[in-house]
Amino acid sequence: MAPRRLRPREAAAWLAEHGCPGTVSTLVTWRFLDRGPAFYRIGRRIAYDVADLEAFAAGQRCETVDSYAVGASKPATRRP
């Protein structure tokens, strides 16, 4: 059976369901910067293999303000 491939909109929704915030625009930016999950270019279409999305989501550390316990120290931020 061939691997299941998702279009960018479906891939963005899949990543959001698995805790990696992002949109179709984020995926476009990641492709441009050579970051993000692996993708396939099939003619003019872009597709993402579900196995590649799983590997990407497993390797990402997604933290938000809500990820920190109350009173815990937050990482230092750089100031320009």
Image (cartoon, helix red, strand yellow):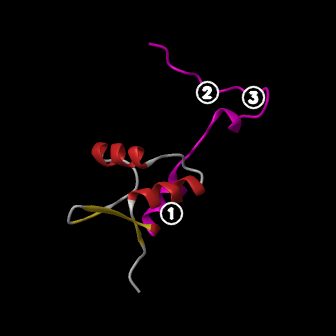
Vertical relation: 66 (above or below) 10 = above
Looking at the picture, which amino acid does disc 1 mark? Answer: Glu
User: Real-space Cα distance between discs 1 and 3?
Assistant: 30 Å
Residue plotted at (33% across, 60% down)? 39
Magenta stretch: dominant secondary structure: loop
The residue at which mark 2 appears reads as 75
Badge 3 crowding class, 10 Å Cα cut-off, few under 14, some 14 to 19, many 20 or more, is few
Q: Is residue 38 above or below residue 26?
A: below
Q: Which one is in front in this view, the residue at disc 1 or the one at disc 2?
A: 1
Residue 38: give x, y in percent of width and height: 36, 59
Q: Which residue is mark 3?
A: 72
Q: Position of residue 2 (x, y in %)?
A: 38, 82
Amino acid type shown at disc 3: Ala
Res. 54 mark: 1
Locate residue 66 relative to residue 38 in the image: left or right.
right
Q: Secondary structure at mark 2?
A: loop
Q: Residue furthest top?
A: 80
Q: Amino acid at mark 2?
A: Pro
> Looking at the image, which is closer to me, 78 or 43?
43
Q: Residue at x 40, y 56 (%)?
A: 37
Q: Earlier in the sequence, mark 1 or mark 3?
A: 1
Residue 29 placed where, x, y %? 34, 42
Secondary structure type for disc 1: helix
Q: CA distance from mark 1 to mark 2?
A: 27 Å
Q: Label 2 crowding class (10 Å Cα cut-off): few <14, some 14-19, many 20+?
A: few
Span of residues in magenta = 51-80
Q: Is residue 36 found inside the magenta-colored segment of the image?
A: no
For label 1, count other residues whose C-alpha is less than 10 Å away and answer few (under 14), some (14-19) or many (20+). Answer: some
